[in-house]
Image (spheres, rainbow, N blue to C red):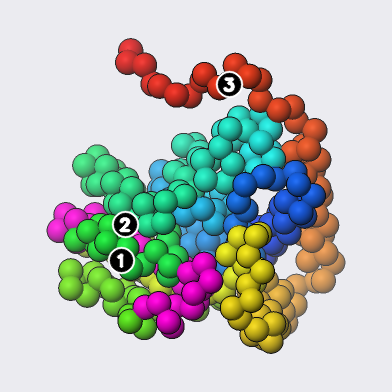
Amino acid sequence: MTQEQLLQAYRDMLLIRRFEEKAGQLYGMGLIGGFCHLYIGQEAVVVGMQTCLQPGDQVITSYRDHGHMLATGMESRGVMAELTGRSGGYSKGKGGSMHMFSREKGFYGGHGIVGAQVSLGAGLAFANMYRNDGTVCLTYYGDGAANQGQVFESYNLAALLKLPVVFVIENNKYGMGTSAERASASKDRSKDGTPWGIPGEQVDGMDVQAVREAGLRAVAHCREGKGPYILEMKTYRYRGHSMSDPAKYRTREEVQKMREQHDPIETLRKILLDGGLDEGKIKTVDDDVKRIVADAAEFAQTSPEPDEKELWTDILLEAR
């Protein structure tokens, strides 16, 4: 990656990190209701993969999805306002994290049913194949969803029809509160597609450059009509499963070690500085990101709540 690309990746990851930290604060203040699943620590995965896509490609994921939205180019204001249930949100304040999407940006939702997005992602890839338009679908899911039956059904169909889909397993080591070591007999998720002949590889998901390199290989494989590809991203989340999870199933020392030795943002910051980038440019990016997030938080708190009439909209699509 060029220095310009690295700086852009740094900005994109930092925006996700600061946005999620602010979302956590708003949740603590009672301004965000329901569940709130933060992406802090995993930013390199979605930012690196997004650099591999072209206009028309699609992204679909689970409920840990704010980072994916921002990476696809969705506006911080709209995402944050949806979290606070305001009319300025992407779903007019009626959906929250699990019911946001942007057809314009190719983001097809963060889904609340564990593993459900995998079969939907295969469906998007089927449409791509049917249209023969050269587009690819990135289908994200976590290690906690990787043993779902519908995942393997999707592998079968994708391999059978050579669907252009990259299955991205974000292995952050814990499915809710259960360690993947205890929950899964599979220790190398990249080989989960072996019975169907689906190639795969394990990737350092804390390294945005490693993610991009693997992502380019996987996406090219799909575009060439060779069928699906599996990428197991070895990553880590610093917070609990959701804001209501104190994460007592792991030690503080474990989390601190990851923060100090493998943080994707700090690692990239050091690479940029060692590469000769002026520290003032990084500070400019830092300040710009802070401004964007502060503006999003202000908008999310001052945007009006949905009108009661919205209860009756977006329910049925009437035939024309």
Residue pictured at 76% horizontal, 54% vertical: 28
Residue stretch in magenta: 157-184
For mark 3, what is the residue?
A: 310
Cα–Cα gap, marks 1 and 3: 41 Å
Q: Is residue 166 magenta-colored?
A: yes
Residue 121 in the image, given as x and y percentages of width and height: 34, 51
Q: Which mark is residue 229?
A: 1
Three-letter amino acid code at disc 2?
Answer: Val
Q: Is residue 215 magenta-colored?
A: no
Cα–Cα gap, marks 2 and 3: 35 Å
Residue 93 in the image, given as x and y percentages of width and height: 62, 33
Q: Is residue 298 something that shows in the picture?
A: yes
Residue 42 in the image, given as x and y percentages of width and height: 58, 68
Sequence order check, earlier mark of 1 and 2: 2
Residue pictured at 60% horizontal, 16% vertical: 309
Q: Are the two marked residues, 1 and 2, in contact with CB atoms closer than 8 angstroms?
A: yes
Q: In the image, which is nearer the foreground, mark 2 or mark 3? A: 3
Which image quadrant is residue 296 in?
top right
Q: Is residue 293 something that shows in the picture?
A: no
Q: Are the two marked residues, 1 and 3, in contact with CB atoms closer than 8 angstroms?
A: no
For mark 2, what is the residue?
A: 165
Q: What secondary structure is marked by label 3? A: helix
Does residue 197 appear to the left or right of 49 in the view shown?
left
Sequence order check, earlier mark of 1 and 3: 1
Give the camera-side residue of 230 and 195: 195
